[in-house]
Image (cartoon, rainbow, N blue to C red):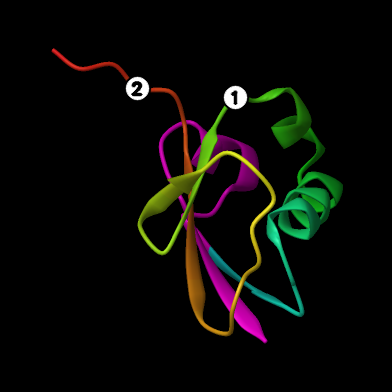
Amino acid sequence: MQVKVLIFGQLTDITGLSEIELENISDRDELIETLTQRYPRLTDSKYAIAIDKKVITHNTPLTDNSIVALLPPFSGG
């Protein structure tokens, strides 16, 4: 199972990438664990997670070809 992760804002400074693809990630919690292992500075960062254009707040299963977005805090104006 393949998952595409889109990374926005200052989170790209942490990862050095705006997009990555991960294999064999079954849910949101496993995704967070994998990302924080690869990019330890994400542990202290605040960000929302959207799966297939829907912001989630709890552990959610991922499907093959899910698109995940890491969204840093933002303010409107």
**x%, y% of residue 59?**
69, 50
Count of residue discs: 2
**In the picture, which quadrant includes the N terminus?**
bottom right
In which image quadrant can residue 40 be found? top right
Neighbour tally class for label 2: few under 14, some 14-19, many 20 plus, Cα within 10 Å: few
- Residue sitting farthest toward the top: 77
Q: In the rendering, which numbered label is found on residue 38?
A: none
Res 46 label:
1
Q: Is residue 35 left or right of residue 68?
A: right
**Would you say 7 lies left or right of 32 here?**
left
- Can you tell which mark lies on residue 74? 2
For the residue labelled by badge 1, is the local secondary structure a helix, a strand or a loop? loop
How far from the left and from the top, in percent, is residue 45? 65, 25
Q: Amino acid at mark 1?
A: Lys
Is 4 a magenta residue? yes
Looking at the rendering, the stretch of residues picked out in magenta corresponds to: 1-19
Q: Residue at x 74, y 23 (%)?
A: 44
44 displayed left or right of 19: right
Residue at left offset 55%, top offset 31%? 47
Whether pointer 1 and pointer 2 mark residues with C-beta atoms closer than 8 Å, the reply is: no
Residue 6 colored in magenta in the image: yes
Amino acid carrying label 2: it is: Phe
Q: Earlier in the sequence, mark 1 or mark 2?
A: 1
Residue 66, how many percent across, how many down?
51, 74
Report the residue at 86% width, 49% height from top: 37
Q: Is residue 43 above or below residue 38?
A: above
Q: Tag 2's secondary structure?
A: loop
